[in-house]
Image (spheres, helix red, strand yellow):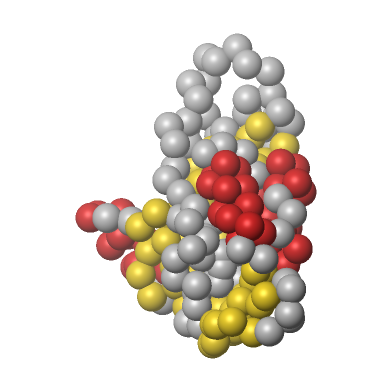
Amino acid sequence: MRARLVRPHPAPGPRRALTGAATALLTLTALGCGDTGSPSGDFNPGGTPSNARPATDPTPQSAPPPTQSAQEINKTVLQRYLEYQRVYKRVYRVNDPAPLSAIVTEPLLSSITKDVQAMAAKNEVWRFTNIFNPRVQSRSPDGASVNVIDCVRTLTAYRYSTKTGQRLGGGTGDAVAYLTTLKYDAGTWKVADSKRGNSC
């Protein structure tokens, strides 16, 4: 587990740090984010935006319907992002990664699943509270991939023993910028990756 106190994405292993120009862009963009939003949890939904699937890809439902406006797509993507955060919080609360498949896809799905399984093996769980204020930053040319920027504020994040109920560690958190990529997959939007940036 990494950056445990920033349960903004509670920070398990899934996230990767941004580097170079990407970090600068994420930091500058995050400065415009507020502090309010829906409380939920996401340890480290970190990741790197993957190359968008070409518009000529014959795979069914590889892009949202052309009849949807950009505003409609943005609204749906942000709703799915917040749902991901809610699922992420529940998953770490009970150490059950099963619900992830409905909202998360690869490569992030495997990363979070492994981290949750590692926590379960140690008989430990996380309890955390985050505040989100996401907004759409960019989308791929074919519209099948959308990047969401968020300054995630972690109010508290504590680790507990599932055997004794004893608090093992944690405390108050801080605010960290995250760049999360959602992809249109089989008719719905799923979180594919997320990257942790600087404080915001």
Tell me, yes or no, if residue 35 can be seen here. Answer: no
Tell me, yes or no, if residue 172 can be seen here. Answer: yes
From the viewer's perspective, tell me whether residue 124 is left or right of residue 44.
Answer: right
On the image, which quarter does residue 190 sit in? top right
Q: Residue furthest left?
A: 20
Q: Residue furthest bottom?
A: 172
- Give percent across and percent down for residue 147: 50, 49
75 vs 7: above or below: above
Q: Residue at x 48, y 21 (%)?
A: 54
56 vs 183: above or below: above
Q: Residue furthest front?
A: 163
Quarter of the C terminus within the rendering: bottom left
Q: Residue at x 28, y 62 (%)?
A: 24
From the viewer's perspective, tell me whether residue 171 is left or right of residue 83.
Answer: left
Figure disc tally:
0
Q: Residue at x 38, y 75 (%)?
A: 199
On the image, which quarter does residue 32 sit in? bottom left
Q: Residue at x 38, y 64 (%)?
A: 197
The one of 122 and 55 positioned closer to us in this rendering: 122
- Give percent across and percent down for residue 66: 67, 29
- Give percent across and percent down for residue 77: 65, 49
The one of 77 and 7 positioned closer to us in this rendering: 7
- Give percent across and percent down for residue 33: 50, 73
The one of 45 and 78 positioned closer to us in this rendering: 45
76 vs 170: above or below: above
